[in-house]
Image (cartoon, grey):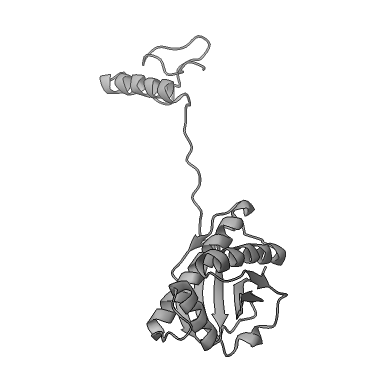
């Protein structure tokens, strides 16, 4: 490493005359500051340490561009895991996408996934009876068991949380890290805007018909 160019105040280096525009500071504070700067440079190994620029509002961030095929593959594996280990059902099957109008009379749980400057909504929807069947399966209740609305909301919310967590792990190879939000149970359907892209994947958990929705911003 090149030696520090700051020498004793008042001396001129060979071939480098003192700057006549500014008188040299020969005070003890100046000499002490010069030596401290030199020691600091020796410790860090660099003359000036530059901090990385923080992200500024309006500056484009890297985006998460995951093709539908990868979302579907991640949902398929996650659904099979949940059906087998959490619901004790004989597997799960994900079918080709359908129109979002198929979910108009469905209810279910939604959970946000946020990362890389983008936000996504993952939802698990079914008919009221389908949600009751999913809830009984994860709670280990008999088929004739009567569940309160709050129990159904909590149970389906837990299933969609497991589904989103599994999907998140399988999309981790896309150079981003998605963060899960809190699931909410909604009686109603998603109304997409022109800027929103929504994919509806019919997913059967054993004998229970559901639809997995994936919503995100276009482009």
User: Of residues 154 and 57, which is closer to you in this image?
Assistant: 154
Looking at the image, the residue that sits furthest to the left is: 28
In this picture, is 50 found above or below 113? above
User: Of residues 38 and 42, which is closer to you in this image?
Assistant: 42
Could you tell me which quadrant the C terminus lies in? bottom right
Q: Quadrant of residue 184?
A: bottom left
Observer able to see residue 24:
no
User: Of residues 175 and 141, which is closer to you in this image?
Assistant: 141
Observer able to see residue 136:
yes
Which residue is painted at 40% across and 15% down in the image? Answer: 7
Number of marks present in the image shown: 0
213 relative position to 45: left or right: right
Which residue is painted at 38% across and 85% down in the image? Answer: 148
98 relative position to 25: left or right: right
The x and y percentages for residue 182 are 43, 69
In this picture, is 2 found above or below 205? above
């Amino acid at each position: 490493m090149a030696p520090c160019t700051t020498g004793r105040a008042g001396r001129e280096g060979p071939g480098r005359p003192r700057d006549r525009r500014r008188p040299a500071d020969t005070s003890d504070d100046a000499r002490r500051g010069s030596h401290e700067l030199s020691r600091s440079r020796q410790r860090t190994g660099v003359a000036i340490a530059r901090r990385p620029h923080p992200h500024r509002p309006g500056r484009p961030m890297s985006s998460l561009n995951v093709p539908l095929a990868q979302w579907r593959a991640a949902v398929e594996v996650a659904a099979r895991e949940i059906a087998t280990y959490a619901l004790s059902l004989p597997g799960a099957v994900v079918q080709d996408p359908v129109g979002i109008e198929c979910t108009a009379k469905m209810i279910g749980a939604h959970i946000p996934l946020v990362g890389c400057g983008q936000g996504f909504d993952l939802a698990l929807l079914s008919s009221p009876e389908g949600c009751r069947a999913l809830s009984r399966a994860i709670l280990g209740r008999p088929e004739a068991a009567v569940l309160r609305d709050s129990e159904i909301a909590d149970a389906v919310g837990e299933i969609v949380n497991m589904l989103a967590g599994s999907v998140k792990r399988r999309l981790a190879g896309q150079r981003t890290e998605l963060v899960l939000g809190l699931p909410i149970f909604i009686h109603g359907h998603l109304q997409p805007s022109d800027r929103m892209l929504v994919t509806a994947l019919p997913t059967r958990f054993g004998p229970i018909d559901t639809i997995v929705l994936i919503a995100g911003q276009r482009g």
